[in-house]
Image: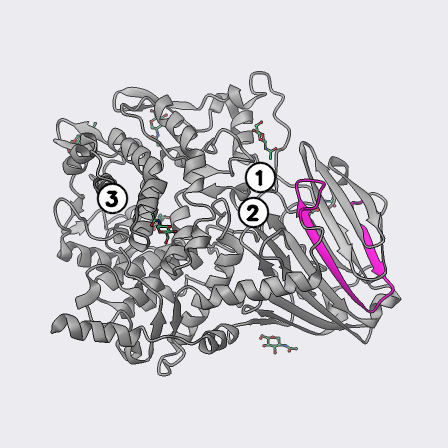
Amino acid sequence: MRAISLLLVLSSLAEAVSVGQRRKVVQSFNVRRNRSSDTTPLQVGNGNFAFGADITGLQTFKPYAIMSTWGWHNFSLPTTPGQTSVDDYTGVQMWTHGRLVTYEIPNPDQNDISNWLRENPHRLNLARVGFDFGRDHVTEDDLHYKSQELDMWTGRLSSSFLYDGRPVQVETWADPDSDTVAVNVNSKLLKKGLGLFFDFPYPDKDKFNAPFVGHFNLTSKHSTVLEKLSCHSARIKHTLDDTTYYTHLSWSGHGKIRGPAEGTHRYTFTSTQSDITLIISFSPSAASPHHSTTYPRVTSASRSWWRAFWTSGAFIDLTSVRNDPRACELQKRIILSQYLTAVNSASSSPPQESGLVNNGWHGKFHLEMTLWHALPFARWNRFPLLWRSLPATYEQLLPSALARADMQGYPGGGARWGKMMAPLAAAPGGLSAPGEINALLIWQQPHPLYFAEVEWRAFPNRTTLERWDDVVGATADFMAAYAWWNETGGAYDLGPPMYPVSENTDANATRNPTFELAYWRFGLDVAVRWRERLGRDVPSEWVKVRDGLAPLPMVDGTYAVYEGIEGMWTSNATTNDHPAMAGIYGLLPPPASGKPLDMEALKKTALKIKELWALDYSYGWDFSMLAMNSLRLGDPDQAVEYLLHPIFQFDDAGYPVGGSRVPTPYFPNSASLLIATAMMAGGWDGSEGIVGHWPKSWEKHVRVEGFSPAL
Ligand SMILES: *[C@@H]1O[C@H](CO)[C@@H](O)[C@H](O)[C@H]1NC(C)=O
Ligand SMILES: *[C@@H]1O[C@H](CO)[C@@H](O)[C@H](O)[C@H]1NC(C)=O
Ligand SMILES: *[C@@H]1O[C@H](CO)[C@@H](O)[C@H](O)[C@H]1NC(C)=O
Ligand SMILES: *[C@@H]1O[C@H](CO)[C@@H](O)[C@H](O)[C@H]1NC(C)=O
Ligand SMILES: *[C@@H]1O[C@H](CO)[C@@H](O)[C@H](O)[C@H]1NC(C)=O
Ligand SMILES: *[C@@H]1O[C@H](CO)[C@@H](O)[C@H](O)[C@H]1NC(C)=O
Ligand SMILES: *[C@@H]1O[C@H](CO)[C@@H](O)[C@H](O)[C@H]1NC(C)=O
């Protein structure tokens, strides 16, 4: 009886949200601007390519970026004797349980090559496209009645303004299937000298390139060549050191392209018609893969792609919750985060934290952040977007991860996943950028097992098992090999040396951090089940290590950051950075093996974090992790409070604000918000008995569709 009535409750919650209603909700959050933002563009894009626009629909006043998955560049290698090649780099040895292990850490005797490896390759800003008003010193203030709308239902960016008393209307679209932006400009000014310019930057070595990427005044360091192909098309070849790529231009009607202007890489396009369309396509090869693309083709492909995006996949409709303004804000974040993660993170290699907006960490991706970035596509039932990068990325990196574990001398080997990386095509060898934290972080290791398990739940068949099997096996092998049998403690220890999720401990003293221990257990549980599902033998080491893992460390009835940490809760050094202990009953499900979690300790830990943690020094995804912990602890109100915490900010266009430690945007925030809200909507294993994953007053008015329970 009870089961039946619960099913009824669930099915009434799961009542369909019609296409018309989805559209209404999505479009109600269409972004409108009347001036350029100083920090974020409005983007059109497809996950592997994005174009960032200012108020003109182009990049006239603000050089926002055009970035791709394939566009990478190296500065020349150092010429310092003994450091002239990647192979010269030796890493650094550290004592690890009585033996010397080589880590990918900057070697103080090899500063130049260490730095080079961190800074190279870096992601390129492909070009800048803007209006040329035919005269110098025009500023945004010279434009009047500026207005702009990004229609998320179709992927159309419409911009308009008056210049010299005459209207200019612009539409900007991205092709869902190629590195192409399509632009339509309508204005009588086009016949009177209004044109478009194309310019090309040279990259820089800074760790963060935000809000803009590259420099337009280092013209002698790179070269461009214009080739006119027909009266409707041209191609600009851009060469920067060893990197070459092409910008393919084609236009409707009469048009002329000339340039570059003296001492620049700036080209100008002018037309004698008052309505023009341009196709601007980028590729590493001279043959344009999309030469036949037309403006109508791009706009219709964009419309269909976005319609399919919004009508497939899961949906949360909070618009009938009228008694609580928090619902509208959460709804806005949910919709904008879906648009922005599709544009910036649905890539064929894992995305950077700043997506395709600008460069953080030289544009490289971080494997420990990949869980945040990619998991929402699974949780919102958009697996094809997840499959763009997974499991392929792990498969591609597998040989280098196996080689890393081998080089580090782990018995039983397996695959030790790197941390900060570029796609294999741009950085052969799968090298992880040298860094002390990079080399000693371990929480990226079980991520493939999380992905595999989530995919299995959606597609429990042999194809799934076989697709992930090599990666699952090699991942678990390393986890078993890495855990160290501590005779004294009579347990398998993690570390030292290591950095836990919170990167602020002494790596040499960090042993048995709570989150990593719980994640090791979770991962080995998944790996064991995987082999059982395949009907194959389970390696005994996996079971032995899992069953012998050190217990989760506790202090005063709470879960501690790591075993033996001094001053837990009493020193502020222990209460800042990521509060990962909350993740063991939030991001992770309770353990399927071993001792159950101590519920009182979980509650007390959550309270202590709320009271004592330096949350203003936290990164945004911490708030989502805390929200998931609150949900499992039965406090959806607190979950919403965390998701709307004043430090967890999103700007007018939904870009996640970086905060005190990282630049804007910081997309793990958007992704984690989607993971947490998917949990509110779909519940989690064992949540069936819990009434309501929403604040009490919302429950009757929330409509959700297409979610499955979280792990
Ligand atoms: C521009 O937009 C802002 C924020 O939406 C609004 O407050 C302001 O009134 C608008 N300005 C004009 C001139 O429309
Ligand atoms: C950068 O240099 C490395 C090492 O020489 C090379 O393997 C890689 O292909 C280069 N990447 C690019 C984008 O040039
Ligand atoms: C940790 O130990 C290594 C030697 O294995 C040493 O080089 C390093 O400075 C130590 N780190 C800290 C933070 O004490
Ligand atoms: C070159 O441009 C950068 C901005 O990209 C600016 O900071 C720098 O001052 C400029 N240098 C010169 C010599 O103009
Ligand atoms: C397993 O599920 C996936 C996704 O539905 C499907 O594409 C595949 O064909 C299935 N494989 C088998 C062997 O049923
Ligand atoms: C082994 O475990 C004991 C007790 O749990 C601990 O004090 C000790 O530091 C551990 N040994 C090493 C080398 O980590
Ligand atoms: C901890 O408190 C001390 C004294 O108030 C302060 O100087 C220090 O910056 C704080 N540390 C952190 C990590 O917040």
**Residue 597 — which label?**
none
> Is residue 674 in view?
yes
What residue is disc 3 on? 526
Mark 1 residue crowding within 10 angstroms, few (<14) / some (14–19) / many (20+): many
Q: How is the image coloured?
A: one colour
Tag nearer the camera, 1 or 3: 3
Residue occupying the far top of the picture:
81
Which stretch appears magenta? 264-289
Circle 3 SS class: helix
Q: Amino acid at mark 1?
A: His
Quarter of the picture containing the N terminus is bottom left
Which badge, 3 or 2, comes first in the chain's sequence?
A: 2
Q: Quadrant of residue 323?
A: bottom left
Q: Amino acid at mark 2?
A: Asn
Q: Looking at the image, which residue is at 36% across and 64% down?
A: 643
In x, y percent, where is residue 443? 33, 41
Using the numbered discs, state the Cα–Cα distance from disc 2 to disc 1 in whole angstroms.
8 Å
Taking the magenta stretch, the answer to whether it contains residue 275 is: yes
Badge 1 vs badge 3, beta-carbon distance below 8 Å: no
In x, y percent, where is residue 333? 44, 67
Taking the magenta stretch, the answer to whether it contains residue 445 is: no
**Residue 122 — which label?**
1
Which badge, 1 or 3, comes first in the chain's sequence?
A: 1
